[in-house]
Image (tube, helix red, strand yellow):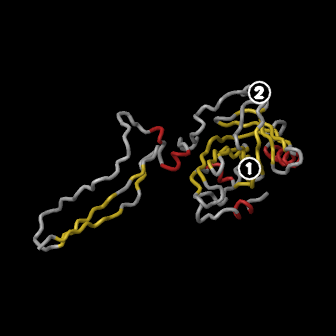
């Protein structure tokens, strides 16, 4: 696959996803696993091969139990820029939903002499329907196998190999991003709701109405139009910093009775 299908499915005037400009850097081959809360929650496993990210959607995510085989569905190749992508894909776009960078790192291929040989083995393995690789991530580590299901083109089984990492759980909460520390809700709201300090807050019903606060204006002469300009800067809470958006300006006017 090339990036033609990836670009054809997306309107880059709407989606924040990268169009694909990054080139390979050499060195170790890289991987990323993204938690994608789309129509159905799933995890996207992406492996760097030949300048693109070969991608599989894993509905239940990777397992560290060798006996637990997980369905992995081959999807279109993604650009290398996707190694660092997370965000909210807007409604109406392909893959609409919240995506966080769940895990990332490098991977190697057993018996590969160097990077070029590793990519050759991965190309051959994809053609033959059998892949073996070792992930060095922050949450997921160790040997993994992928086997194409008999009679299927895009459906594979992903399962853990037997090694010292069997059964080890991820080191961070499953729903948090490695990049931002945000949960999927945090991506949507700009702050993790679970992290808010609500000590002293009391549970209460939603008020049925709110009485507006009246503005007290300076003394005026009878019949004279008064205008008060107010500049308001709005800030969005963020787990990393306070992000200010451009101020907007209101003008409040009052006509005194004669």
Residue 57: percent from left, percent from top:
72, 47
Residue plotted at (69% across, 40% down): 61
* Vertical relation: 195 (above or below) 12: above
Q: Residues within 10 Å of mark 2 (few under 14, many from 20)?
A: few
* Quarter of the figure with the C terminus: bottom left
* Vertical relation: 40 (above or below) 134: below
Left or right of 32? Residue 195 is left
* Vertical relation: 94 (above or below) 191: below
- Mark identifier at residue 55: 1
Q: Residues within 10 Å of mark 1 (few under 14, many from 20)?
A: many
Left or right of 5? Residue 151 is right
Nearest to the observer: residue 175 or residue 17? 175
Residue 185: percent from left, percent from top:
52, 45
Nearest to the observer: residue 207 or residue 254? 207
Q: Residue 4 sits in which quadrant?
A: bottom right
* Quarter of the figure with the N terminus: bottom right
> Label 1, label 2: how many angstroms apart (C-alpha)?
24 Å
**Helix, strand or loop under label 2:** loop
Residue 65: percent from left, percent from top:
74, 30
Left or right of 120? Residue 6 is left
Q: Which residue is mark 2?
A: 163
Earlier in the chain: of badge 1 and badge 2, it is 1
Nearest to the observer: residue 128 or residue 9? 9
Residue 199: percent from left, percent from top:
37, 33
- Mark identifier at residue 175: none
**Helix, strand or loop under label 1:** strand
Residue plotted at (35% across, 50% down): 208
């Amino acid at each position: 696959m090339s990036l033609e299908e990836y670009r054809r499915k997306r309107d880059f005037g709407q989606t924040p996803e990268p169009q694909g400009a990054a080139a390979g850097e050499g060195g170790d081959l890289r991987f990323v696993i993204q938690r994608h809360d789309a129509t159905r929650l799933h995890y996207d496993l992406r492996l760097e091969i030949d300048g693109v990210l070969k991608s599989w959607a894993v509905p239940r995510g990777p397992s560290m139990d060798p006996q637990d085989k997980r369905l992995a569905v081959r999807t279109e190749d993604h650009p290398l820029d996707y190694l660092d992508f997370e965000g909210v894909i807007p409604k109406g776009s392909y893959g609409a939903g919240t995506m966080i960078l769940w895990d990332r790192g490098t991977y190697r291929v057993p018996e590969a002499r160097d990077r070029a040989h590793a990519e050759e083995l991965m190309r051959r393995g994809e053609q033959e329907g059998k892949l073996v690789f070792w992930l060095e991530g922050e949450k997921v580590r160790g040997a993994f196998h992928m086997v194409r299901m008999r009679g299927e083109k895009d459906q594979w089984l992903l399962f853990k190999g037997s090694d010292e990492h069997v059964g080890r759980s991820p080191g961070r909460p499953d729903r948090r991003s490695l990049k931002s520390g945000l949960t999927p809700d945090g991506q949507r709201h700009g702050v993790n709701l679970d992290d808010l300090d609500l000590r002293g807050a009391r549970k209460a019903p939603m008020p049925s109405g709110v009485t507006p606060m009246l503005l007290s204006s300076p003394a005026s002469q009878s019949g004279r139009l008064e205008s008060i300009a107010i500049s308001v800067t709005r800030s969005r809470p963020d787990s990393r910093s306070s992000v200010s958006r451009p101020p907007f300006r209101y003008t409040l006017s009052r006509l005194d009775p004669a």
